[in-house]
Image (cartoon, rainbow, N blue to C red):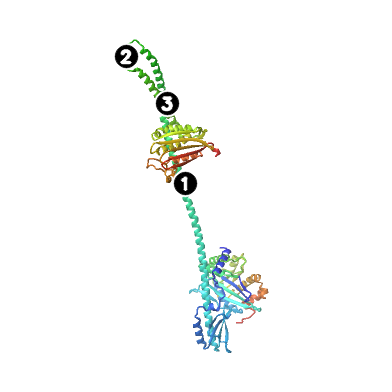
Amino acid sequence: MSSPLSMRQQENRLEIGVRGYDSVLSLRELLSGVVPEKLSAALTVLLGSSVRVVSADGGWVMGEAPVLTNTARRLPLVNELETVGYLETSSSDEACVRAVMIILESFMRSGARYFMASEMHIEVVKTDYEDLQRKHSALMASEARFKALAEQLEERVKEQVNTIASARSQLYQVDKLASVGQLAAGVAHEINNPIGFIRSNLSTAQSYVQKLQGVAELFKSSSDTALCDAWQSDDLDFVLEDFSTLLHESVSGADRVARIVSDLKGFSNVDQAEEELIDLNENIRSVCNVAANQINSRADLKLILGELPPLHCKSGHLSQVFLNLLLNAAQAMKQRGEIQLQSSVEQGQIVIHISDTGCGIPPEVLSRIFDPFFTTHEVGAGTGLGLAVSRDIIRAHGGRIEVDSVANAGTTFSIYLPIDRSAS
Amino acid sequence: MAELDEVTRKLTIKLVYYGPAMSGKTSNLICLHDLLSPDLKGEIMTLETHNDRTLFFDLLPLGFRTPSGWLVKFKLYTVPGQVVHDATRKAVLSRADGVVFVADSQRSQGVNNAESFQNLEENVGRVGLNFEALPLVVQFNKRDLPNVLSETEINERWSVAPWPLMMASALKTTGVRETFIRLLEAVYPALDKNFSLHEKLDTDVVSFINAATGESLGNRS
């Protein structure tokens, strides 16, 4: 709404060739509404003599050939104060000539009116159209702005939904782990006591058996034949020997129970949010113990553990990650295969590869496996949270988890954990 | 902006009568046509609807020839006052050399006058003219009617405005000629500055106005 706009409008008008309602009109334009032949024929009849209408510059003529005889007259035709042409006639009838002049000038006036009205109409229509276009483009611009906003909104809602989903998945998992942890801790505590006295009793029993073996020689070398026969018939030599073996096996069995219970306790420490300085290999070993039963039926587990520096971490959470990956690997086995767990240090990071020789992950699924609630299992069989939570845990430790899979050949998950998180 | 054609020796000046609907712009032109007797005087060309309201504009051509053979032509236009015809008002206003704002003196018309004057100011800007520099005369018309604002009231209200205030009654032919002369007095210096009229046309403001109104040359028609 400033002057440059109107300049542009004027330029447009020049470009399109609109002449403007106030332009100077020629005689030809003023008489454009009449048929020249008919008008000049009528004027000839009215004047009773030859008649001609000529434009001021002589360039446009209506009527017969030149009538310029001695008696010829030339009368100016005026439009808007200016002579635009002449009436030439040899008629000497003053009244008739004046009447013809009035007729001609009336035609010219009506021509001028028509011209001005139509030019003004064009101009007004053009301005209105330009106004409309300007409003239209302003509307388009604002529509585009709102569209962009709407799209952004959608994106932001999606982001929020994702944040909420992953927070929920973590909460869910943490909650689950916490209750499992509590249960495990409770069970471990309950088992710990009896296993303690069982173990100690077994040791005592072993020493008793040794004592019995010392006395056995006395029995056998005794002269009491009844005693010797009874010893022989009950095969107490074998009993004593087997007793010792049984006790030995029971001790190692009780030791194994004690170890599993202690692993379970360490593993169930998920609700313990404090970070501690640990050797990750220890974690891996204890997870393998916990999972051994489920893995052993399906695969051979091979540990290649390199020497690792102590790591500041939430060990219970990382154990959960290893367990998830190990159990996934075991489930991927259609026939008995191998699961390899490898740990090493590369460029300031602890790197852990967990490889299996299972069925592999189809490429179309590979990009989604870390999405919360994504699962290939039947409804109810899996939460679809294991890998999502695993990734979140690794990220919380400043690390990353990658997957590499070949269909029907196997899958390798690689975990990278920075040793010094403040440096990364 | 006036058009000056050196070849045909012609100066065309555009003057516009602006104002709210029914304030008497066309009456001003009719009255001027009757009152003035310049060298050259055309008929009023009206482009009106059947109900006598101006549709596009009215046009009154006036003019005179200087002794040196120059044709000075005035084209006096009115604009349609109704709000809807804003595009027409802008078209008529473009390239104007001077404006008479015809206000309706009746007390009931205060709002219409104000809106129309604001519309004039906006449109002057839109067509690329400078409102500060535009020669403008404000005429309060219909002084003959009852229930009009008093001259004192009008003068008070417009006391800070820089434009000449004229009282008129177009139907009683008073004040119309004076308004036109006041406008020419404002227009002449601007034209003189742009085209050096005193050199080219050999005129001064008095002879210019006299010739335009037909005062001293007498009625030659």
The amino acid type found where label 1 is placed reads Gln
- Badge number at residue A160: 1
A372 or A190, which is in the foreground?
A372
Q: Secondary structure at mark 3?
A: helix
The amino acid type found where label 3 is placed reads Asp
Q: Nearer the viewer, mark 2 or mark 3?
A: 2
Q: Nearer the viewer, mark 2 or mark 1?
A: 2
The amino acid type found where label 2 is placed reads Asp
- Badge number at residue A229: 2
- Mark 1 belongs to chain: A
The answer to whether residue A406 is above or below residue B13 is above
Q: Residues within 10 Å of mark 1 (few under 14, many from 20)?
A: few
Q: Residues within 10 Å of mark 2 (few under 14, many from 20)?
A: few
Q: Residues within 10 Å of mark 3 (few under 14, many from 20)?
A: some
Residue to which mark 3 is pinned: A255
What quarter of the picture does the N terminus of chain B occupy? bottom right
Q: Indicate the position of residue A147 as horizontal and vertical percent values.
A: 48, 55
Residue B82 seen in the figure: no
